[in-house]
Image (cartoon, grey):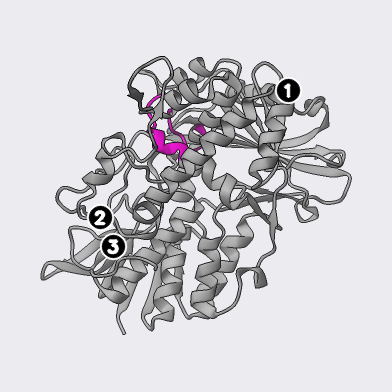
Amino acid sequence: MARIAVIGAGMGALACAARLAVAGHRVAVYERTETYGGAVRRFERAGFGFDTGPGLLTLPAVWRDLFVKTGKEPLESRVELVQVDPSARHVFGDSTEVSLPNASRAGVVSALDESLGSGTGQRWGDFLVRAREAWDRTRRPLLEEPLWPDWRVLAEREPYPAVPHKRLLRTRRAGTLAEVAAWELRDPRLAALLEGHALAYGLDPRLAPASAAVLPYMEHAFGTWYVRGGMRELARAVYERCLARRVEFVFGAEVVRVLEKDGGAAGVELAGGEVVEADFVVAPGTLAARGEGEPAPQGGLPSRLTVLLALRGGRPPGTAHRTVVHTRDREGELESLFGTAPGVPERPTVTVLRPDDPALVPDGDHEAVTLSAVVPAGAEIREEHVEALLSMTERAVPGLRDRVLWREVRTPADVAAETGAAGGAVPAPALAGAGGRLLHPGNSTGLRGLFTAGGWSHPGGGLPHAGMSGALVAGLIVEGPEFRGSQ
């Protein structure tokens, strides 16, 4: 039985701690804040409840596997999972809109043809077939296995298939997601639909590799899910699973240094000077030493601006859980976010979450709504930025301002305070291609016995990927460096 110190109580760390405890190790988690969950938090006031981090879940199989492997019981015995249908309502810059069914290719094709015009559905359906090929090629190395020692192969090979362009005698291969949209989808609304998936993760579609096609494919193939009571309920369930497996938690304990002895990790030092000995240390990816030649940690990533709205009046029947209101000026938005002088866009793309969940409102005569947009990490948020989100949302929710009882604004500084990420930056999932720029450093490090779990290490950000990082680290500690992932 080894002594294992886990730094931070984010979702990847919790997933790792539970698996290690089941394997018979003595695990202690040291969290600098007073609660668990990392970015998966909840804000409550006057009978209203809001998720302040992720609001929806893809790839629930990652968390189902955790509960089976750590207790031989289904995840659904601890939380209620609800498939969101429609998956999303999209309001485009020209005011056309479409609601896309959840996990139904035929339904999506039909909805697009009906709302955007004949042929748009077929083009999107053909794109999903190619996206599946990219997913099949990258699923194991970028989600289910530790980062390959020869990771540069993933950096150099673009897994998205080449598509012949009719105007040329040769095959023209899309190198970026924006090129996929321009060459294959050939409709600005389909382009917005595709590029919006990259933007939601803080990626510039003009630079994101074509392999980013896997992002919309994951939602399409595995569905979009909501946890009844809010996503914080998932964090609660995982935390309680850790407690049941006798993981120790020490809150308000900031780790300032990983101790080294004889060339390996030997424990951690806390801010108060206390030294905790350990045989292994699991740390966030931003904290750990890197091995020679590993991908560099990503930097300069965008953050989130979130506005929580308590509304008078109940949720209208038939309201979509998620609505994406696309900007009318996509190039202007991208230049604001990713240009030489990043700033908050004047009219950003806004995601509107309106869950049908009585647990989040004081009664049926009120509604809890969450607005969010991508902003630069470290951005200073002003009232005009909040007003821009409200104005964009009114395109999809007429009369919104008249219903507002109160609002709460969450800025990149709030994200930084909760997660410890510089500027409140939010990591994206690892992607192949792009010269390795969107790969994350491996879970093993340059210091023997020190491993990394969470969104800033392989396989990257997002709830499914964070959960898999925990599984990979547990496998590397329990089985050793020969561990090659789940079979």
Q: Is any atom of residue 425 visible in this view?
A: yes
Task: Locate residue 249, reporting x and y percent.
Answer: 46, 71
The residue pinned by badge 2 equals 148
Tell whether label 2 touches label 1 (CB within 8 Å). no
The alpha-carbon separation of the residues under discs 1 and 2 comes to: 46 Å
The residue pinned by badge 3 equals 451
Vertical order, 179 against 147 (above or below): above
The residue pinned by badge 1 equals 395
Q: Residue at x 67, y 38 (%)?
A: 108
The alpha-carbon separation of the residues under discs 3 and 1 comes to: 46 Å
Q: Secondary structure at mark 2?
A: loop
For residue 298, what is the image quadrant? top left
Task: Locate residue 163, reporting x and y percent.
Answer: 41, 29
The alpha-carbon separation of the residues under discs 3 and 2 comes to: 15 Å
Q: As shown in the figure, which amino acid type bears the numbered disc 1?
A: Arg
Mark carried by residue 258: none
Q: Secondary structure at mark 1?
A: loop
